[in-house]
């Protein structure tokens, strides 16, 4: 029995470090799993927001295409929407629609003058 007590007394620091290492490894695994779950959620949220921004760009395009012009306030709004969309990695049909809207007239009177000069 004395040998066991002597062994424990001589090696208690090593046992504490071994226990601490085991606990930290378990905690690290839990943390890694939690981070992976959060990353998946963040990707899903980003994809959802990107889809809503794309939808807003498409809706604005359809709304103002029929009018033949886009008011300046709407064009500025679409610009901000597009910048956020692009920041989330958006790079498809919404890009083409935004590029078209950027060049539309902002005043219906300008649109009429352009048609009268043709």
Image (tube, rainbow, N blue to C red):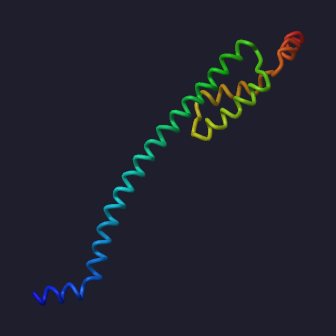
Taking the image as shown, residue 25 lies to the left or right of residue 103, namely left
As drawn, the residue found furthest toward the top would be 116
Q: Position of residue 111 (x, y in %)?
A: 83, 15
Q: Up-down: is 47 above or below 28?
A: above
Image quarter of the C terminus? top right
Q: Quadrant of residue 50?
A: top right
**80, 62: nearer the viewer:** 80
Q: Position of residue 43 (x, y in %)?
A: 48, 41
Q: Quadrant of residue 20?
A: bottom left
Q: Position of residue 31 (x, y in %)?
A: 39, 56
**15, 61: nearer the viewer:** 15
Taking the image as shown, residue 30 lies to the left or right of residue 50, namely left
Residue at image location 68% in from the left, 28% down from the top? 98
Q: Up-down: is 90 above or below 110?
A: below
Residue at image location 57% in from the left, 39% down from the top? 89
Residue at image location 26% in from the left, 78% down from the top? 15
Q: Position of residue 52 (x, y in %)?
A: 56, 29
Image quarter of the N terminus? bottom left
Taking the image as shown, residue 100 lies to the left or right of residue 51, namely right
- Number of callouts: 0
Residue at image location 13% in from the left, 89% down from the top? 3
**113, 27: nearer the viewer:** 27
């Amino acid at each position: 029995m004395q040998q066991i007590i002597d062994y424990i007394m001589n090696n208690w620091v090593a046992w504490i470090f071994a226990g601490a290492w085991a606990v930290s490894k378990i905690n690290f695994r839990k943390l890694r799993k939690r981070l992976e779950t959060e990353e998946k959620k963040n990707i899903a949220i980003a994809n959802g927001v990107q889809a809503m921004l794309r939808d807003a760009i498409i809706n604005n395009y359809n709304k103002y295409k029929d009018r033949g012009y886009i008011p300046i306030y709407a064009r500025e709004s679409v610009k901000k929407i597009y910048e956020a969309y692009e920041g989330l990695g958006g790079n498809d049909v919404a890009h083409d629609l935004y590029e078209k809207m950027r060049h539309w007239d902002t005043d219906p009177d300008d649109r009429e003058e352009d048609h009268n000069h043709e």
